[in-house]
Image (spheres, rainbow, N blue to C red):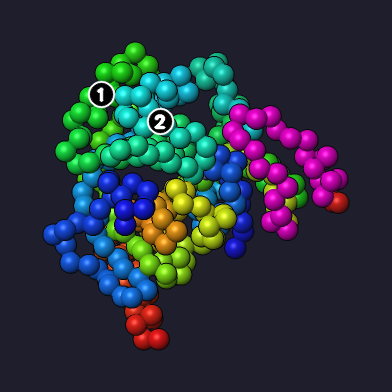
Amino acid sequence: MLLIYCPYCQVERAETEFACRGEAHIARPADPSQTTDEEWVEFLYMRDNTKGIAAERWRHIHGCGRFFNAVRDTVSDNFLKFYKAGEPKPDLEALAKEAGK
Amino acid sequence: MSELLASDLITPDAGETPLLSLPSISILKAAPLTRLSLRCREAAQKDAGAAFGAELPLSPLSNSTAAKRAALWMGPDEWTLLAPEDDLRTVFDGIEEKLSAQPHALVDISDRSEAVIVSGDKAVWLLNTGIFIDFSLELFPVGTVTRTLFHKAPVMIWRTGPDTFVVEAWVSFMEYVAGLLVQSAGELEAA
Ligand SMILES: [Zn+2]
């Protein structure tokens, strides 16, 4: 079982308290009425599906209920960073280097 | 139980027989309570606490209590407020009045959940039959409150004493939660 750190509760909890909500930092088009179908498809469905270091949204659904972001190595399941929603996307390359990848 | 946190608030329901009563552990149904869910931003927190009678705790997983009042941290902008059953109207209207000019959500959730009081030497052991949390006093001191899972049911755990926990579950899950607690405790009887 994975142990996941919630940056709001500031504790590490079992994976069963959390839900993964896919790739992080996908901005909703600011003006949907001016968006083409292709752009909308891109926003709704197209994801990088990274093999390696990726930033994801997680939700502490059976805890504080808040969404936050985490950087995870999708190959090893090793978490490299947890941070609150709204904080900028970390430098994934630097994190990977730090982790010796 | 008088040394316990909130012992004027969380009391065994006198009309109910104990769910379990062993030398090392007891499980008692708690008497009905007023439960309010409050969500608001930082600007409203002081006023809300003043109107309620106990300030809103700001550090994660913590609680603050006053006479017949307890405010429990549920999230960075969410609290559960506890008061005696008969104080519902007073507390609810008092907070609404004080926060009338500030964005907030105050909801009466008194009947959404039920509570049992789990206490005794084996309380931590028993909770750990269904919860993946380290309940040592260093990591989970008296006063700590959290939502988590008990087996497959969402519960709220509030440590009101070194060996005493309030376990809340939604009404329709309580039979499952209390049932599994009693069943797991059966192991102690056998030993
Ligand atoms: Zn949390």
Segment tinted magenta in the rendering: A76-99
Circle 2 SS class: loop
Q: Residue furthest bottom?
A: B191
> Between marks 1 and 2, how big is the CA–CA gap?
14 Å
Residue drawn at x 47%, y 42% is B62
Q: Is residue A57 visible?
A: no
In front of the other: B127 or A84: B127
Name the image quarter holding the N terminus of chain B: bottom left
Chain at numbered mark 2: B
Q: Position of residue A95 (x, y in %)?
A: 80, 42
Residue drawn at x 32%, y 30% is B53
Left or right, B168 with respect to B41, comes to: left
Q: Position of residue A40 (x, y in %)?
A: 56, 28
Residue under pointer 1: B94
Q: Position of residue A4 (x, y in %)?
A: 61, 52
Q: Look at label 1 and name its amino acid.
A: Gly
A70 over A40 or under it: above or below:
below
Residue under pointer 2: B55
Q: Look at label 2 and name its amino acid.
A: Glu
